[in-house]
Image (spheres, coloured by chain):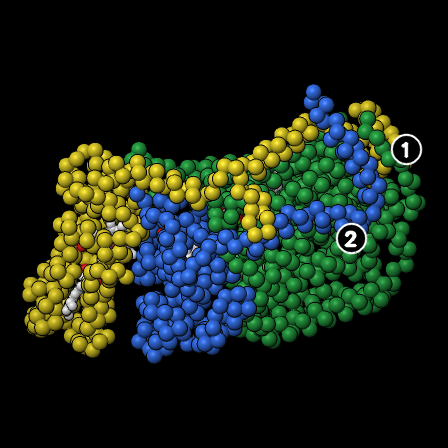
Chain colours: A green, B yellow, C blue
Amino acid sequence: MMERLTGAERQIALMICVVMAIVGLVMAAAGRGDPMGSHGAIVLIAAGIVTCFVLRAIGEPEPAEDRTTSYYDDPTKAGLVIALFWAVVGMGMGVWVAAQLAWPDLRFDAAWSSFGRIRPVHTSGVIFGFGGNALIATSYHVMQRTSRARLAGHVSPWFVLLGFNLFCIVAASGYLMGVTQSKEYAEPEWYADIWLVIVWVVYFVLYIRTLARRNEPHIYVANWYYLAFILVVAILHIVNNLAVPASLTGAKSYSAFAGVQDAMTQWWYGHNAVAFFLTAGFLGMLYYFLPKRAERPIYSYRLSILSFWGIVFFYIWAGSHHLHYTALPQWVQTLGMTFSVMLLVPSWASAGNALMTLNGAWHKVRDDATLRFMMVAAVFYGLSTFEGSFMAVRAVNSLSHYTDWTVGHVHAGAMGWVALITFGSIYSVVPLLWKRETMYSWKLVEWHFWLALAGTVIYVFAMWNSGIVQGLMWRTYTDSGTLAYSFTDTLVAMHPYYVARACGGALFLTGAILAAYNVYMTIRHAPEKRPERDYPTSSEATEPAVPAAE
Amino acid sequence: MSVKERDPLTGHQTTGHEWNGITELNTRVPRAVWFFIIVTHIWALVYWVLMPAWPLVNTFTRGLLGIDQQVQVDKRVAAADATRSLWADRIAALSLDEIRDDPVLVSHVDQTAPALFGDNCAACHGSRAEGGPGYPSLVDDAWLWGGDDETILETLRVGINAPHPDTRYAEMPAFGRDGMLDRDQIRVVAGYVQSLAGLHSGAPPERLEEGAALFADNCASCHGEDGTGMHDLGAPNLTDSHWIYGGSDEALFETIYGGRQGWMPAWENRLTEAQRKMLAIYITSLADEGPE
Amino acid sequence: MFRKILSPFARLFEFHARTHYRTERHSMALTLGIIVAAGVGGFVEIAPLFTIDETVEAAPDMRLYTPLEQAGRDIYIREGCYACHSQMIRTLQDEVDRYGPYSLAVESQYDHPMLWGSKRTGPDLARLGNKYSDDWHVRHLVDPRAVVPESVMPQYAFLLDRTLETESLPDRLAALRAVGVPYSDEQIDNADADARGQARPDTDAADGVSKRYGDATSVRHFDGQRDRVTEMDALVAYLQILGGLTDAAFANQPPGED
Ligand code: HEM
Ligand code: HEM
Ligand SMILES: [Ca+2]
Ligand SMILES: [Ca+2]
Ligand SMILES: [Cu+2]
């Protein structure tokens, strides 16, 4: 994979590996007896593995071809494969987590296997491992294709991809060891947080430099979304993770904020992790792969503008809907609620824009499971944003908050939208990248589609039921005006739904495993085909006049 | 690439760009979108005017309705209290027997007590008050402090060994750890206790005699000469078959060696008098039904 | 009519779309636009929480976590208890009836980070302190289903066997002071001994705890084992102080149901 690097680039890569190895060594030595020491060892091993790869290529001849005449797809390919790996791990963990709530003894008699420790392995595994890798990989692909320019660099794409995965591994292994800051979706400890900042800055620079090389006068909508994803996640991450470590040789740190300010900062982050990681980034994917696959023009450029800026501006305000009726001052709750409702319009505008784009291609949706993945994803996107805005209304939230209704909402978004759009994109881009005619088996894609849809529907319905039942039981009063149910009564009522959820999750996981297998077989066994015209053309496109609406 | 084309299907014009085959139509923003933007914005504006909404540097706009979530819930809780007090005040004022005789009050108890018991007591005493290792059954008729209403109510109010100024103290001394009896003596007296409870202890008669003597010297002051316990001290009856901590060799050894100090929380600050009375009626009614 | 209302907006949007068409060619303009658009909301919602005084109520009786309790809190975080338990009673009647007075901001004033939670797979724990005995907590944590058969909570029996690591407590308290918790030098210097003393009432170290953290501090064998200080001691000590740092919440609210 490293053959396409020049000698100088290989040396830079090697130097980075050496620096990383030293950092790992220092961490391992200084943090002995603390989980930080184990993380040092992990960093050291990771650096060692990458070094091996680089060393294997170091004697190879320099790349002969003119590199600017082609796209640089190696990191994309690696990223997609890694994303599928995380999909299986993260969703496998999800099924286990779900099973523990149905059958709590389904675990090992060891600290690492308890619910509280493996739950974040699931959430980080799917959001960052699966989602993050898919975002990075597709962003490389999309920005090159829509800019008609090769990536601006050969080491930095690898640095971003592998560095990000190092973050994911440190995060996941940390949770199992009990290393966590407890802030949802930002659990990794301070040194992992710092590392992610470095990776992210490089990612941004890479992105901006590639855009600067583009041969198109205009920047395509998908890139607006990817850019918003990169920028805002950086801001959120840095602010929410401000903390003071108890010692430089240990993992433990304390958040810079406390109490109500900490809560608001956390959910400003948490909600916008949803907005800019799980929404903006994947909208970037949608805006490229859906029209590409459907071979239809985007329904409306103007609607794209409206929904993009609407999403960027309104989402940020909505975080306080996670804190309705709490000790957070009510004025902030009001803002969170009203902005969440106003947010619905741009959200639906983007979902509608995608679905309207399919006009004229519905026969393809019927025949092509890959496109169907994307269509259903857009539907679930619309559904979960509608549900989200609804749940953000205080009166509704008083019922839904703390219950499985939230979990149902999360997975309508996470499985129905995030995972489905990702699988759709993977199925459409894998044959292109590996220069195959098609996926190895379209039947498996079809199977995957139905498994994923069934899994999502079962999961979400089970959680809607259990959430609403539990929420209602908590607040049911007897005729005497006293509480009708004890907390334990609700636990008994939850059990059947927890079983159903675990089954739905298992279906979904099966689909993901099929996807991994299908991709593997495509790489290995599908017949080759040279794609036509998939290279950068340097001719500067001419600038069309400012269009007027019709 | 820069030519604006018309999409043959919709007849709309494109923006004239193409990105790797993707084009965009320049369709107007649909009217419905504008409509909903206006609706949601107007709604938000109205909401902001009526409710606390916008921060100023040291304060915030309070809204014309003057609503505050804390004041609101305080009011709601007070109103609910007022409605409940129609019957709860009577429960608080009457004796348990008087309540039991009033079918209306009993129906309130029946509705209220199970969930109240589930949220507060079941964790220790079990969901049917049947007790468990370390926690006494409330449905057998063996009472540590006596089974009359007043005593039960007092126990609920002040707890046992709990952080409450009037709490009941119940202490089974640690005879072994504090060096009052050696290990062998403990085994001997434990055997005697088993025999009191009618358990087969397998100890030879002379050991039992030795045990009886030890018991008379050390234990009778609290558990009574005959081992039937003493309600004033919360010292349990050792001759019945109801154990808190168990009647096996190991359990008895542990009890006598390390002592016992059960911790029954005081509920005075957590539950109202009426609630405590309802619970007392509930558990005594369960006790009347007996263990399942 | 609808068209009339819309027409000024339509013209504005037309202008905006054309401007956009020109600026979307500049990646830095886009970058700046995104930062500004996404920056406003967070700033307006977070910054005033530091400047509006009434955000956090006054509570003169507010006390700090002892080192043992703080160690327990760190274990609570480590084990991910917050994934199932909230510590935030909302301003809703049923929550006040079930769990007690609603939570005030001041009660988590020194909580770095806060543990308000977002899911109640188990009950809220904001007012848990003194609701159950130490012994019950130990039994429950060792095997939840032994005491509550319906429970889906994991077992934490290993906490009883793990000696509590206390050497790092002075560092931890110092870090907490750096982020705003008013620990004194003396409290920081003695954190290690105080942590062990609070779980060993029979040792001299116990006196220091009462001296530095007040006589009301519970000094007990929280885990029932007299000769060692385990992680169970710390966790139970923490659970028993939940809701007990200040009485502020009880001051302005009537106690309990009815
Ligand atoms: C195989 C499919 C999946 C299963 C069985 C599953 C299961 C679960 C379970 C049991 C929980 C914990 C809920 C609780 O605490 O009560 C959870 C939480 C979560 N999962 Fe999944 N999950 C799956 C797929 C996904 C995917 C694909 C994503 C994201 C892309 C995702 C994101 C999340 C998030 C964000 C949470 C935290 C929710 C919250 O805190 O409210 N899950 N999942
Ligand atoms: C208009 C868009 C959306 C709005 C207004 C919205 C609103 C909400 C609300 C009100 C909650 C419940 C907060 C609580 O009671 O604790 C929530 C939770 C959540 N939503 Fe959404 N949502 C939206 C879209 C999405 C999408 C597309 C996803 C995609 C995955 C998503 C993922 C989540 C997650 C992960 C949580 C759980 C947070 C936690 O850990 O508690 N949301 N959302
Ligand atoms: Ca973090
Ligand atoms: Ca959550
Ligand atoms: Cu949200």
Give the image location of residue B170, x and y in percent: 19, 63
Taking the spot 56% from the left edge, 72% from the top edge, the residue there is A247
Q: Residues within 10 Å of mark 2 (few under 14, many from 20)?
A: many
The lab-note entry on whether marks 1 and 2 share a chain reads no
In this rendering, does residue A436 appear at all? no
Compared with A347, C127 (above or below) is below
Give the image location of residue C91, x and y in percent: 43, 45
Q: Quadrant of the C terminus of chain B?
A: top left
Label 2: state its secondary structure. helix
Taking the spot 33% from the left edge, 49% from the top edge, the residue there is C255
Give the image quadrant in which the ligand numbered 2 is located: top right
Label 1: state its secondary structure. loop
Q: Residues within 10 Å of mark 1 (few under 14, many from 20)?
A: some
Three-letter code for the amino acid on which mark 2 is drawn: Tyr
**Front position in the image: A463 or A193:** A193
Give the left or right position of residue A284, taking residue A108 as reference. right
Compared with A296, A317 (above or below) is below
In this rendering, does residue B56 appear at all? yes
* C-alpha separation, residue under disc 1 versus residue under disc 2: 28 Å
Q: Residue at label 1?
A: B3
Give the image location of residue B62, x and y in percent: 53, 42
**Front position in the image: A315 or B245:** A315
Compared with A129, A458 (above or below) is above
Three-letter code for the amino acid on which mark 1 is drawn: Val
Chain under disc 1: B
Q: Which mark is residue A443?
A: none
Q: Residue at label 2?
A: A207
Chain under disc 2: A
Give the left or right position of residue A111, taking residue A209 as reference. left
Q: Residue furthest bottom?
A: C204
Q: Is mark 2 within 8 Å of ligand 1?
A: no
